[in-house]
Image (cartoon, helix red, strand yellow):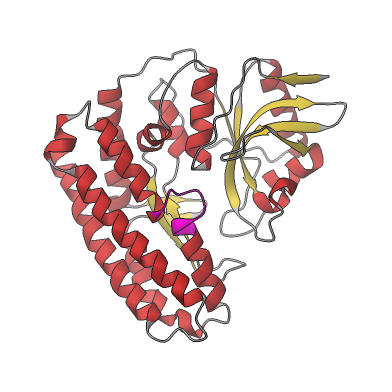
Amino acid sequence: MKKILTNWKHTPGIHCGSVAVRDVLNYFKIDMTEEMCFGLGSGLGFYYSRDSVSPSRSIHVRGPWMEANFFNHFGYTLKDWKYEDNNEEAHHILIDNINNGIPSLIQTDIFFLDYYSSSTHFPGHIVVVCGYDDQRKVFYLSDTSFEDLKEVSFEQMMEARTSKVRPYPLSNNYIDIDLKNNSIDISEASMKAIVLNAKYMTEGTETLRGKSGIDVLRSWALDIPGWKKLDDWKWASRFSYQVISRRGVDGAGFRWMYRDFLEEAGMYLPEVKKHQLPELMDGIGSKWNMLSAVLKQASEADEPGDLFNGASQIINNILKMESEFYNNVIIHLDSK
């Protein structure tokens, strides 16, 4: 039997998580921009890993729990993704959800998704399962920038959902959503989301991927001059450049996407415009864009020279700017 969710529509976009959330909203007849989905999920973050398989140093510029945070504005009480250690049970959950008209967000490693033809592991990539064909043994997925639904075999799906590659091993991570309550107060939700993101960054958060926050940026600034001694310094540089500017982040490590969210939120929250939050985030994004250019240059150089020292200086500038931004948010918006 072949079954695809009735009237399912996928609209290509920028970032896997926010596209997935927007697709689910469309299914439940709710119209919202991808940038608003990202911002209402408190999507900014920063991770730094020193124990990745390849490259040996890696960064991640998105925050934790974005999808769960977003749907909590609709009355859910999600704290994290759901996990299922039993592969057979995880498979049947997806099937049962489709049969009940419920889409499932899942996390995957693109290395195991044939349509990517990727030689690099990238665990945590989010797609939406919107159908299946049990005779052909395939699932149908909505995936970020692809126009059409993608077919993934049952076997590939299991591999993609259970990848144990560090720094983010997967255990059939999923969120199933049935938006019976489709009302939301954008003003209240925006205020909560902006303050929550600021607290995530200033106080730090701990997840399976590691720690995210301002202090992690400080650690990277201190560590990156030593990258010149790494055997894979070129690949570490290239991967970091891609994470900041190329891999579904709208440039500038999601900071420009968040800027666009702030501009939209400013239509509902006068405080956002009063304290010039979009303009400040635009400046932060410019620094991230500058950093990615230095990392790209390092990845193409015969020798790194002083490029990693220069990158460290830019990271410290970003650290200062982001610290001031989040502290200002907490001072001016948290009491509202």
Vertically, is 114 above or below 9? below
Percent of width and height locating residue 46: 40, 56
Residue drawn 58% across the image and 82% down it: 231
> Residue 249 lies in magenta, yes or no?
yes
Q: Quadrant of the C terminus?
A: top left
Q: Is residue 97 above or below residue 121?
A: above
Give the camera-side residue of 332 and 203: 332
Residue at 67% from the left image edge and 15% from the top image edge: 100
Q: Is residue 79 visible?
A: no
Q: Position of residue 98 (x, y in %)?
A: 68, 21
Which residue is rendered at x = 36% and y = 73% of the image? 311
Q: x and y percent of residue 29 in the render?
A: 49, 15
- Outermost residue, front direction? 147
Total tally of numbered discs in the picture: 0
What segment carries the magenta color? 243-251
Q: Nearer the viewer, residue 334 or 277?
A: 277
- Position of residue 223 in the picture relative to residue 325 (left or right): right
Q: Nearer the viewer, residue 153 or 162?
A: 153
Main SS, magenta region, reads: loop
Residue ID at (27%, 45%): 198
> For the N terminus, which image quadrant?
top right
Left or right, 16 with reference to 283: right
Q: Nearer the viewer, residue 196 or 127?
A: 127
Rendered image quadrant of residue 270: top left
Image x and y of residue 151, in percent: 75, 36
Determine the image quadrant of residue 53: bottom right
Q: Is residue 327 visible?
A: yes
